[in-house]
Image (cartoon, rainbow, N blue to C red):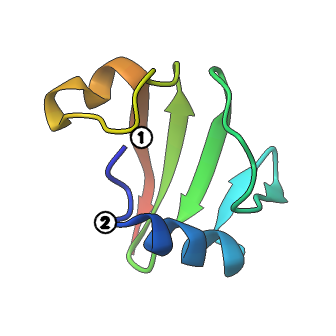
Amino acid sequence: MGVAKTRMGTKHLCDLGKVLLSGKTLKPSHILEGGEVLEIHLPFKEIRLTVLQLPSGNSLSKADRALYGTIETLREF
């Protein structure tokens, strides 16, 4: 979805407890499903990511990102 630049960056956010699913810290090993809503606390903003569906392949073009999820800014610091 483009929230973190790398998978390691995403894992680091999870390890720090910055990614929440239903108010609980998400583990990096969690397998996302369509319909899940994540809250992500980044250094300068908080966002809500809604997973619409998962792509069938391993990679996703920037043009197709809107088909698989939506990002809403909750608060900017």
The foreground one among 32 and 24 is: 32
Residue at x 63% of width, y 45% of height: 38
Is 26 on the left or on the right of 40, as rendered? right
Q: Quadrant of the C terminus?
A: bottom left
Task: Give x and y (percent) for residue 72.
Answer: 41, 40
Q: Position of residue 65 (x, y in %)?
A: 29, 30
Q: Residues within 10 Å of mark 2 (few under 14, many from 20)?
A: few
Left or right of 36 in this view: 69 = left
Classed neighbour count for the residue bearing mark 1: other residues with Cα under 10 Å, few (<14), some (14–19), many (≥20)? few
Q: Does 22 appear above or below 66?
A: below
Label placed on residue 48? none
Number of residue marks: 2
Q: CA distance from mark 2 to mark 1?
A: 18 Å
What kind of element bears circle 2? loop
The picture places residue 62, in percent across and down from the top left corner, at 18, 37
Q: Which residue is mark 2?
A: 5
Which residue corresponds to the image point at 33% horizontal and 18% vertical from the top-left?
67
Q: Amino acid at mark 1?
A: Glu
Q: Secondary structure at mark 1?
A: strand
**Relative to 6, is 21 on the left or the right?**
right
| Residue kind at label 2, given as amino acid type | Lys
Q: Residue at x 61, y 52 (%)?
A: 39
Locate residue 75 relative to residue 28 in the image: left or right.
left
Q: In the displayed image of the protein, which residue is found farthest to the left?
A: 63
The residue pinned by badge 1 equals 72
